Image (cartoon, rainbow, N blue to C red):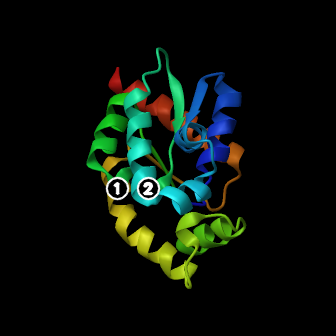
Amino acid sequence: MGAGKSSVGRCLQQRTGLARFDTDEIVSSKFGMSIPEIFSTHGEERFRAAETRVLIELAPAEAAIIVTGGGIVLRDKNVDLLKRLGTIVWLEAGEETLFERASRRGNRPLLQTDDPRAKITEMLRERAPLYAKVADIRVETAALTHDEVADVILSKIEDLIARQK
């Protein structure tokens, strides 16, 4: 949350011309409501189940950019599905940066607590080891613009492809 996944996904789409699929946008469309409304009305578990269904249904015929929410790695099945879909990129930033960015928007369902800062800390502690385990590419985003992050990702993907040859 706050690493820049959606914005960087749009930058990558503009740069590459590839199709972009954002699992949050797809889930929101299927429910006909925003992510905060889904969490409020149906709960996190139902949202997570919908994320999994979206990944199962995603089978792009050609290379594509798939943007996911940060919690998608909480289910082993999702990790397996993501690995089959392609290269996994972890956009990371320090806790302070993530908190500042995520706090700009007041509609983050997981931050609707008495102590949103503690929630960020808890999520990072739980998720960072999962991200580290599954990521093919890791990009520190704190000091970079979205365009610069896109540049780094494209360069690292080129490097991966070159090493596989």
- Left or right: residue 61 versus residue 29 is left
Disc number placed over residue 85 in the picture, else none: none
In this picture, is 154 found above or below 122? above
Residue type, label 1: Leu
Please state the horizontal and vertical placement of residue 46, each as a whole percent of the image: 42, 52
Real-space CA distance between mark 1 and mark 2, rounded to the nearest whole angstrom: 6 Å
Q: Amino acid at mark 2?
A: Gly
* In-image side of 26 versus 103 (left or right): left
Q: Name the residue that disc number 2 marks.
A: 71
Residue at 43% over, 56% down = 71
* Residue holding disc 1: 74
Q: Quadrant of residue 106?
A: bottom right
Do tag 1 and tag 2 residues touch (Cβ < 8 Å)? yes
Q: Position of residue 104 (x, y in %)?
A: 72, 67
Residue, x 47% and y 20% (percent of image)? 60
Q: Give the x, y percent position of residue 28.
A: 59, 43
Percent across and percent down for residue 25 are: 60, 41
